[in-house]
Amino acid sequence: MGSYVVGVAGGSGAPYALRVLEGLLNGGHQVSAVFSHAGRRVFELEADIHLTGEPGSDRKTLAAALGLESGAERLRLFALDDFGASIASGSFKTDGMVIVPCSMGTLGRIAMGAGSSLLERAADVTLKERRKLVVVPREAPLNLIHIRNMATLTEAGAEVFPAMPGFYQRPRTVQDVIDSVAGRVLERLGVESRFLQRWTGPEAANRRWAEED
């Protein structure tokens, strides 16, 4: 199985992050996660999950929130200021990194190569080692600075995947909408998504809709 880094920054999107984490861990992958201060705040506001910034206790809290009956041992959390962490070095082999959600502030600092936190340093390492980096911004409207920073990251090798759910599958629940984004994010990392509904044509979508009725 693979080894992935998950960064959670500010910006609305805690449900996306939870589903991506769930997909990676239930798929048998190793996950190294780091939250920004704003990312922890978003989790509290949007998911009622209180993270303190202390990796030991936060790991237990997050594992419980994800309902992990198995796989909790494959989840590691790091403090935001822990520049001695494994994910701060290019010699630590990973299969890629995703930042979900990714605030425009975090995106901009990565684009500038600032690396002022472990989250940003891990992203910088991912780029310099030519590994897959997927950033999932959730912001609207976009100003020109945002657009230019996203272009810079794209030119540097990252993949910008805005949290834009599709509705052609005719989702019935909020979870369906979340899955349409989280499932495709996982696939951009090269991870098979078990909850992504693939488009096979309008007939199949209509049939599924009728069966659920």
Image (cartoon, rainbow, N blue to C red):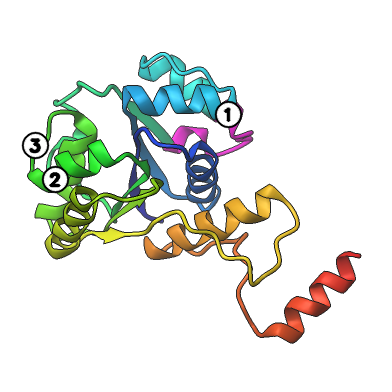
Task: Find numbered disc 2 in the image and state the secondary structure of the residue it sits on.
Answer: helix
Is residue 123 rendered to the left or right of residue 13?
left
**Residue displayed at 18% across by 28% down:** 117
Q: Locate residue 194, reporting x and y percent.
A: 60, 61
Label 3 – label 2 distance at C-alpha: 9 Å
- Occupied quadrant, residue 33: top left
**Residue displayed at 36% across by 14% down:** 54
Sequence-wise, which precedes: disc 3 or disc 2?
A: 3
Residue behind mark 3: 114
Label 2 – label 1 distance at C-alpha: 28 Å
Give the extent of the magenta segment: 63-74
Q: Which mark is drawn over residue 124? A: 2
137 w.r.t. 8: above or below: below
Label 3 – label 1 distance at C-alpha: 30 Å
Of the two numbered discs 3 and 2 in the rendering, the one whose residue sits closer to the viewer: 3
Q: What residue type is labelled 3?
A: Ala
23 w.r.t. 80: above or below: below
Q: Quadrant of the C terminus?
A: bottom right
Q: Is residue 64 magenta?
A: yes
Q: Locate residue 190, reporting x and y percent.
A: 39, 65
Task: Find numbered disc 3 in the image and state the secondary structure of the residue it sits on.
Answer: loop
Structural crowding at the residue carrying mark 3, measured as other residues with C-alpha within 10 Å and reported as few (<14), some (14–19) or many (≥20): few
Is residue 85 rendered to the left or right of residue 1?
left
Is residue 176 rendered to the left or right of residue 36?
right
Q: Residue furthest right?
A: 213
**Residue displayed at 53% across by 50% down:** 23
- Occupied quadrant, residue 177: bottom right
Residue behind mark 1: 47
**Residue displayed at 52% across by 53% down:** 27
Q: Locate residue 175, reporting x and y percent.
A: 66, 49
